[in-house]
């Protein structure tokens, strides 16, 4: 992509334009996920890195080094990630949960998942029935990546409020309206639920420390667009006596139409591979997807294509290339012109179909226990 | 008080100056509590009116006529009142609960009491431990006025949040930040808990309708200073499919130092008779209290005193004059100069002492069942 200086916008509520991730990292003031840090993770895990880490999807962090220091000295952390249930998940949503699952397994740490059915009601025009229904559907999909039930805990906001609220009360008191206005750019017409919401989104970061009455570090893998949310969390942590959560930031999986992120915010369904898309729809979306190819076959054979702007290459990168070696070869063949976009899509399709099949089976297998993991009572009264 | 045009301020967070209640009622756009309405209440209740209604403490309302129409046609209402637990109750706080108790008994309707331990944490510099402790103490004092346990329900915000939240989610979505900013005058530094709080304060007004899935009217007796809170509630009621709550507004009991209302907001303890004041402290406060008397005995004998500005007269009015006849005579003797302030205070003291004694005994008798009335689970999931 070189030195393009196109305009782009990245906030928790909007991702637009061709994102210069390095510029964004510097803008946000986060740290680079260096090869040294990756080597440390590999060494502690005693395992090869998963695609999210090995292939540069995760590229930025806050305080990951300190988190690993503490871990090596015997203070384990916990993972926290979440989902705003505004509709079906798309394949890009599973990227952070797949990383979490890997970390949970290798580091033997608890995972906390927050389903924000209240927030999506406040932020979108959905009914309460819809946000709750999608909340449960999304939860099944998230758990289907293979989390260990014993080490996995769920906050389903409207059902977990009794557990979250005592902590959220103390958090809310530390956050002035002016902060959320500045961070999220809320206009005066923003409803008071959404204004309050940051307190609830912050609560899981501190929950285990509060519950156990000792300092338990938190690691939050998330899209870099979500960093502003957790900057607020980090700013108030010390005042409440809890450790600042560490963050691990990913690039966004680009949309199939070549847009900034695989997202439905613009209601362009063809930009997104939904986990509940029927296979024929998946095929059509892939066939129509934007690539980094040239206008003609001849030109592409001669000049090669540009993987970095290609929505199909981004999918190979997440998990569909089964090995890093396969991903490297594919990338080289794309860049050299040896691989044409049509052939690349044809090779990807059976992998995606197999993934959909596995995912749907896994999803059925979690239904039995999913709701039993929802936390409903507070660990202490205050 | 005639036509004095002194400045006064009345908001949910501040009461200052000598209040012209009639001007305030017109400013707020509420209706006059006429003698016709009072006669209707007396007739439906089949009983003489309690001091709050008979002696003009309650003087304004919204939609009380419609509420009585519905009641007479067989649709009973429920009562809702609350308390922000920032410290011990004072004797003026019991005025609205005494009225509620009377209405509960005569109209055989349920009473909902909200204890806002979250709000007081957000609005004041108190710790969570303090707001919860005061919440329970205040609840005992409130219940001590004689509510029927079978018909009395309590929302203790931090403990009742699971019950209130599903409804509060839908309420919050209807209230833009700009509304609470305009109504309460919140500066940008206001914490996001207090911004959200109106949603929780609104929830009890709709709770029985939500719980039972049919329209149940609500009556809220409150100080006129609290009207702005419930104007927001009334504005959003229809959009949520619930009836607008009716309101019954009281004058504020003036402070012992002659200030706008018996309140501790200025941290002037001598302005207030706390229910936990030891009797010698009560005596001292009464002895030092501001009255409507003249500078000399001679002048008072000649010109008479001014009951309307007198903090002692206001106490007789609430409940310490045992009959309306006694109250009328006292007022006449005050105005004529027959009754001197020292004698009036001496006559009041044994009544107050007896009240404190009764109240303390009653308070002990509610401890057994008070917490059992706290609602902790929602009537329905959404």
Image: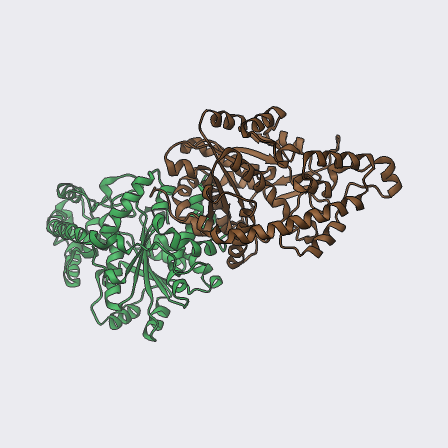
Chain colours: A green, B brown
Instruction: From this view, report whether residue A343 is shown above or below residue B210.
Output: below
Q: Position of residue A90 (x, y in %)?
A: 23, 47
Residue B121 appears in view? no
- When asked about the image quadrant of residue A258, the answer is top left
Given the current orientation, which residue lies at the most extreme bottom position?
A73
Q: Residue at x 37, y 70 (%)?
A: A66
- Horizontally, residue A359 falls left or right of residue A56, namely left
- When asked about the image quadrant of residue B164, the answer is top left
Q: Position of residue A327 (x, y in %)?
A: 17, 59
Nearer to the camera, B151 or B196 = B151
Q: Position of residue B316 (x, y in %)?
A: 70, 41
- When asked about the image quadrant of residue A336, the answer is bottom left
Nearer to the camera, B15 or B307 = B307
- Horizontally, residue B335 falls left or right of residue A106, namely right
Q: Position of residue A87 (x, y in %)?
A: 27, 43
Instruction: From this view, report whether residue A274 is shown above or below residue B306.
Output: below
């Amino acid at each position: 992509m070189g030195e393009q200086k196109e305009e782009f916008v990245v906030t928790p509520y909007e991702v637009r334009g061709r994102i210069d991730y390095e510029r964004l990292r510097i803008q946000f003031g986060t740290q680079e996920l260096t090869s040294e840090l990756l080597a440390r993770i590999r060494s502690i895990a005693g395992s090869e890195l998963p695609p999210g880490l090995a292939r540069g999807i995760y590229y930025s962090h806050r305080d990951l080094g300190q988190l690993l220091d503490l871990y090596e000295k015997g203070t384990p952390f916990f993972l926290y990630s979440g989902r705003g249930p505004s509709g079906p998940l798309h394949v890009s949503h599973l990227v952070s949960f797949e990383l979490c699952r890997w970390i949970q397994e290798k580091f033997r740490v608890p995972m906390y998942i927050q389903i924000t059915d209240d927030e999506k009601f406040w932020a979108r025009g959905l009914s309460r029935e819809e946000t709750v229904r999608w909340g449960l559907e999304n939860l099944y999909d998230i758990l289907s990546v293979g989390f260990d039930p014993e080490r996995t805990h769920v906050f389903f906001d409207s059902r977990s409020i009794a557990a979250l609220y005592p902590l959220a009360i103390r958090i809310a008191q530390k956050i002035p309206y002016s902060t959320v206005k500045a961070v999220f750019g809320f206009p005066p017409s923003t409803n008071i639920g959404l204004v309050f919401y940051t307190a609830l989104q912050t609560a899981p970061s501190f929950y285990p420390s509060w519950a156990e009455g000792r300092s338990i570090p938190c690691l939050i893998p998330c899209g870099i667009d979500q960093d502003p949310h957790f900057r607020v969390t980090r700013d108030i942590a010390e005042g409440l006596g809890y450790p600042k959560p560490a963050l691990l930031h990913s690039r966004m999986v680009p949309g199939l139409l070549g847009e900034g992120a695989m997202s439905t915010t613009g209601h362009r369904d063809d930009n997104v591979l939904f986990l509940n898309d029927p296979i024929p729809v998946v095929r059509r979306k892939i066939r129509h997807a934007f690539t980094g190819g040239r206008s003609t076959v001849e030109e592409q054979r001669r000049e090669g294509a540009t993987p970095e702007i290609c929505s199909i290459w981004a999918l190979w990168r997440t998990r569909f290339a089964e090995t890093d070696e396969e991903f490297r070869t594919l990338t080289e063949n794309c860049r050299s012109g040896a691989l044409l976009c049509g052939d690349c899509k044809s090779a990807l399709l059976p992998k995606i179909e197999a993934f959909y099949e596995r995912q749907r089976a896994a999803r059925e297998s979690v239904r039995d226990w999913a709701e039993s993991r929802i936390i409903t009572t507070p660990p202490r009264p205050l």
